[in-house]
């Protein structure tokens, strides 16, 4: 069995050399290993809006140029075959709009969640503010994991086989 996991943009930032609090090199390596055997990673095409903004802000904040790795990182994300790039479905867009109407302003997160629900995927995110919003508004969060929970569940599942 291979789990379908939709990634929040946070999990793509290390490809650009941007470190993410709470995501260690060991976590990244474990996620890569899982991606070869137990997990199929999906990315929503609209996350580029978020990724490009985040890497630009990070470069400005640190006073560095990421130009040297941009092409390699983009090539890796798009052409490696490690990630499958998808677009939101009609149902995902409807869910995203409903979340916006209920007050969640981050439309990318809304589209990611809507896609995960519509496509029966795990949504991998560390965004506790968004998860809290979902819970407060009685949305299902059984499919919303962070990487630690995903790793734990797969390790438990593997040990039972």
Image: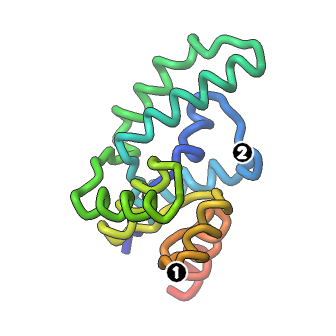
Question: Which corner quadrant of the image does residue 150 belong to?
Answer: bottom right
Mark closest to the chain's N terminus, 2 or 1: 2
Which residue is disc 2 drawn over? 25
Q: Identify whether 114 is placed above or below 81.
A: below
| Position of residue 60 in the picture relative to residue 40 (left or right) | right
Question: Which corner quadrant of the image does residue 60 belong to?
Answer: top right
- Gap in angstroms between the C-alphas marked 2 and 1: 34 Å
Q: Are marks 2 and 1 in contact (CB under 8 Å)?
A: no
Residue 5 seen anywhere in this rendered image of the structure: no
Q: Nearer the viewer, mark 2 or mark 1?
A: 1
Residue 15 in the image: x percent, y percent?
57, 33
Q: SS of the residue at dot 2? A: helix
Which residue is disc 1 drawn over? 138
Q: SS of the residue at dot 1? A: loop
Residue at 22% from the left image edge and 58% from the top image edge? 90
Residue 35 in the image: x percent, y percent?
47, 55
Question: Which corner quadrant of the image does residue 151 belong to?
Answer: bottom right
| Position of residue 82 in the picture relative to residue 103 (left or right) | left
Residue 156 in the image: x percent, y percent?
60, 81
Q: Quadrant of the N terminus?
A: bottom left
Residue 101 in the image: x percent, y percent?
43, 61
Q: Identify whether 154 is placed above or below 65.
A: below
Residue at 29% from the left image edge and 52% from the top image edge? 88
Classed neighbour count for the residue bearing mark 2: other residues with Cα under 10 Å, few (<14), some (14–19), many (≥20): few
Residue at 59% from the left image edge and 37% from the top image edge? 13
Q: Identify whether 159 is placed above or below 46.
A: below
| Position of residue 10 in the picture relative to residue 121 (left or right) | right
Residue 89: give its label. Answer: none
| Position of residue 90 in the picture relative to residue 83 (left or right) | left
Residue at 30% from the left image edge and 66% from the top image edge? 119
């Amino acid at each position: 069995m291979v789990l379908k996991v939709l990634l929040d943009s946070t999990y793509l930032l290390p490809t650009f050399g941007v470190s993410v609090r709470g995501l260690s090199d060991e976590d990244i390596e474990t996620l890569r290993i899982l991606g070869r055997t137990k997990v199929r990673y999906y990315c929503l095409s609209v996350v580029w809006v978020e990724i490009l903004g985040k890497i630009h802000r990070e470069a400005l904040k640190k006073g560095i140029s990421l130009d040297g790795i941009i092409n390699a990182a983009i090539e890796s994300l798009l052409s490696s075959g490690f990630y499958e790039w998808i677009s939101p479905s009609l149902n995902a867009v409807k869910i995203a709009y409903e979340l916006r109407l209920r007050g969640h302003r981050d439309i990318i997160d809304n589209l990611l969640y809507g896609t995960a629900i519509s496509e029966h995927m795990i949504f991998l995110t560390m965004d506790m503010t968004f998860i809290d919003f979902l819970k407060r508004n009685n949305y299902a969060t059984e499919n919303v994991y962070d990487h630690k929970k995903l790793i734990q569940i797969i390790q438990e599942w593997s040990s039972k086989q």
